[in-house]
Image (cartoon, rainbow, N blue to C red):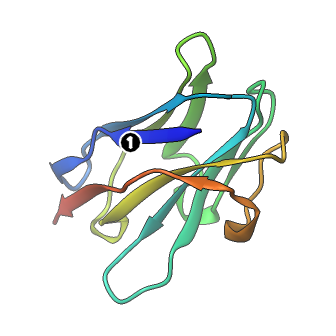
Amino acid sequence: VQLQASGGGLVQAGGSLRLSCAASGRTKYGMGWFRQAPGKEREFVAAISWNGGSTYYVDSVKGRFTISRDNAKNTVYLQMNSLKAEDTAVYYCAATRRLGGSTRTYDYDYWGQGTQVTVSS
């Protein structure tokens, strides 16, 4: 499977962005979003099961970010609201054979290229 992330950009604190991740090839995967800030390790942000029935979030984004998917379009989304300066990072989408999704980086088998999100304070 190939993953193509898009939708990043520069936004002021309190603003919103929606990231998209388009998948090609076999698409029956759990999906996740991760992020990596300069000088920090890659961290889990959100995940969704292959049928969209289950979602998971890191505590720092709960209530602000929403992960969703449209399997007819082979696309996963991350709606990010009330953005904060600490959300600034490169965001990556990833696919896992664990159909229920996972919060663990090492469970993911395929990764897209990153998309930069910069939040100015």
- Residue 80 seen anywhere in this rendered image of the structure: no
Closer to the camera in the image, 97 or 88: 97
Q: Position of residue 64 (x, y in %)?
A: 48, 46
State the image quarter where residue 69 is shown: top right
Q: Which quadrant holds the C terminus?
A: bottom left
Q: Is residue 63 left or right of residue 89?
A: right
Closer to the camera in the image, 54 or 86: 54
Going 49% across and 83% down the picture, which residue do you hit? 41
Q: Position of residue 73 (x, y in %)?
A: 52, 14
- Residue 81 seen anywhere in this rendered image of the structure: yes
Q: Is residue 112 left or right of residue 27?
A: left
Closer to the camera in the image, 11 or 36: 36
Going 67% across and 28% down the picture, which residue do you hit? 27
Q: Position of residue 55 (x, y in %)?
A: 73, 41
11 relative to 78, above or below:
below
Q: Which residue is mark 1?
A: 5
